[in-house]
Amino acid sequence: MRKKEAHILIVDDDEDILFSARVWLKKFFTEVSCLSQPKNILKFLSEQQVDTILLDMNFRKGFENGQDGLYWMQEIKILEPQLPIILMTAYGEVELAVEALKNGATDFILKPWNNEKLYASVNLAVDISRKNKKLNQWENVSIKTNQYQLETQSPAMQEVMDQIDRVAPTDANVLLLGENGTGKYVLAEHIHELSERKNQPFVHIDLGSLSENLFEAELFGYKKGAFTDAHQDYAGKIENAENGTVFLDEIGNLPLHLQTKLLSLIQNRKLSRIGESKERLLDVRFIFATNENLKKAVAENRFRKDLYYRINTVELNIPSLRERLEDIPTLADYFLDKYKQKYHKPDLALNETLISELTHYSWPGNIRELDHCIERSVILSNEKNLKLLMPQDEESEKTIVNLNIEEMEEILIKKALKKHRGNISLAAEDLGLSRAALYRRMEKFEL
C-alpha cells in the first residue's frame, strides 16, 4: 500500500501513546511527528505544515474533565482555523465528546483505540485538510475574474474562437501567440472554463514578472531547509493547480536551465520540489502564451526546440486590435458600461463621431490600451458628455536624435503600418516596397 503524502502531529504526555500511535500511523502516512508538551504546539505549527493533529484532552495531573484539550484546540484554531483536530481521551463521556465536536473537533477517539478506527479517523481528517487547502487555493489563485467581452464580428477572431471551441474540451497543450494586450489571459481562462477541469483551479503564472532567482521556487516549490529562507515546506504554483489548468504567460522568458525541467514535467507529469529527491505525480493541463517569436528564439538557441514542439500541440495566433477593427465599437461599449458603473456616470455614451475616432487609431497596446483609454476618458469627462482622451502617437512625437539608417527604416515602417491600420499591401505601396520585402523587414525588426 502506497503511503499517503500527509504530515500528522500527535500531542500527548504519555510516551507509550506517542510511540504506538506513531508506529501505526507511519504505515499509512509519509510523516508523523510527536510532541509531549502542548505548549510547544504553536511554535511547531509556525515552522511546519501539518495536515491534521491528534490531541490528548488531559495534560495536568488530577484533571480529567478534558478542558486542557479544549483550550489547546481553541489556541490552534486561532492560528490554523481550518486544521482538522482529532481529540483523544481515556475518560469517555458522551457530554465531553459532544462538547468537543461542538467546539470544532473533527473527531473524538477513546483510548485504548481500535487501530482500524484510528486510521479511518486520521485518513478522513487528512482528506478534509486537503479539501480545505484546495478551497484556499481557489481563493488565492483562482478567484473568478469578471465576465469578459468575447463576442466578435471579426472573421480573424471568429476563426480563433472556433478553434478554441474545438481544443478546449481536450487536454492538449495550447500555445497562444500575439502582441501584448491582445487578450491572451482572457482566452486562456476561457479555454479552462470550456474544459472538463473548469471546477478545478486555474493558476496564472506570469513568468515575465518573476526574477530569475525566484523562478524555480515559485514554479516548483521547495522543501524546508533547501535554502536559507526556506523555513517550511512550500508547494509551488504548478503543484497548486493539481487537477486544474496552469497558464504559463510569457513562456519565452523562461531561462534555459528551467526549460529543461519544464520539459521533463510536461513529458513525465512528475514534479520535484527544490531540495527533494522524491517525485510527485501531477495532473494538470498546460496553456502557454508569449508575444515573442519562438521560432527565432529556437534558431538563436535561446529556447529549446524540443520544448517548443512539446508546448505547441495547438498553436493559436491572436489577431491584434488593428486587425479586428469591427470589434472596436463593441469592446468600447463594454469598457464604457464597466467604468460608467464604477465611477457613477450613467449618462455617458459613445456616438458615431467618437467611434470613428477610436477606429482610426492604430492601438499598438491593443485591447489593454483601449481599456485604459476608456477608463481615463470616463474619469476626466463631466457627468453628461464623454470626451475621448486618445493616446498620443509615440512615433509622431518621437524626436530623431541620430541619423542611423536602420533606426529610421524601422520608424518609417511603423508609421506606414499605423497610417494604414496594419494593411500590409497599402503600407508596402506607401513605402515603395513589395509585400515580400516589407514582410522581411517586419521580421527583421520583430514587428
Image (cartoon, rainbow, N blue to C red):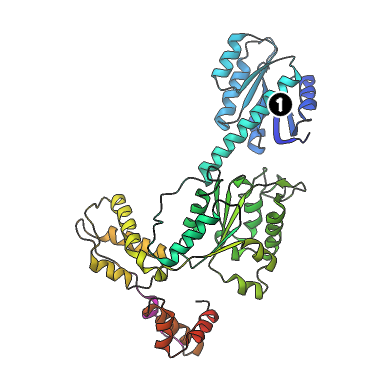
Considering the whole magenta stretch, tell me its main secondary structure.
loop
Q: Picture coordinates of residue 280 (x, y %)?
A: 71, 46
Q: Residue at x 40, y 71 (%)?
A: 322
Q: Name the element at disc 1.
A: strand
Residue situated in front as seen by the camera: 224 or 307? 307
Q: Judge from the rendering whether residue 94 lies leftward or rightward of residue 358; answer left or right.
A: right
Residue situated in front as seen by the camera: 297 or 254? 297
Q: Picture coordinates of residue 363 (x, y %)?
A: 39, 70
Q: Quadrant of the N terminus?
A: top right
Q: Quadrant of residue 328 in the image?
A: bottom left
- Label 1 amino acid? Ile
Q: Picture coordinates of residue 37 (x, y %)?
A: 70, 24
Q: Picture coordinates of residue 297 (x, y %)?
A: 62, 72
Give the magenta part as a residue range: 391-402
Q: Quadrant of residue 158 in the image?
A: bottom left
Q: Judge from the rendering whether residue 413 lies leftward or rightward of residue 37; answer left or right.
A: left
The residue wearing badge 1 is: 10
